[in-house]
Image: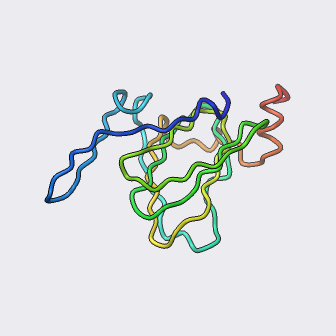
Amino acid sequence: MTIDDCREIEFPRMIDPEGSLTFIESERHIPFALKRIFYIYDVPTGESRGAHAHKELQQVLICLSGSFDVSIDDGARRREVRMHRPWKGLYVPRMIWARIVNFDPGSVCLVLASEYYSEADYFREYRDYLDARSGGA
């Protein structure tokens, strides 16, 4: 996997004078069966979240409110993606290092995950991640 495998996903939107609605269906709008949902909020100014990669888990990150940047890294290249639309998500496949930064006050990040939580699935140290990418682990 490389950062080229990360991509924006635009979800269906129903726009109405009474308010908009976006829906997401497992394996239809996201490229995996949904096993876990969590959200990140109340992140203090200047702090970041994430800073890890997964061995198997795939995820889609969605900015429900506010805005933030997602730094994606495949060990060779890195780029940042600005998230600020609740009808758009960022697909992050397995073996991509991701870090969420530059949270605006009041931002909420929804994460859709392909696997149940397992600490064994994480690379929490960047050096360990790079070793695995190069075949060392």
Instruction: Name the image quarter holding the C terminus.
Output: top right
Q: Tell which of 134 and 75 is nearer to you.
A: 75
Which residue is depicted at the point 47% across and 35% down? Answer: 114
Which image quarter: residue 45?
bottom right
Lateral position of residue 117 relative to residue 128, left or right: left
Q: In this view, does 41 lie to the left or right of 27?
A: right
**Residue at the spot 63% in from the left edge and 62% down from the top edge:** 48
Q: How many marks?
A: 0
**Left or right: 97, with 58 as reference point:** right
Where 16 sits versus 57, above or below?
below
Colour scheme employed for the rendering of this structure: rainbow
User: What x and y, as percent, mark residue 19?
Assistant: 19, 58
Q: Point out residue 1 in the picture as x, y percentages from the top left corner.
A: 66, 27
Give residue 128's quadrant in the image.
top right
- Residue 71 x/y as whole percent: 65, 50
Please give the name of the residue rendered at 54% of the width and 59% of the height, measured from the top-left corner: 68
The quarter holding residue 102 reads bottom right
- The residue lying at 64 percent from left, 71 percent from top is 46
Where's residue 79, x and y in %?
68, 45
- Side of 18 where 9 appears, left or right: right
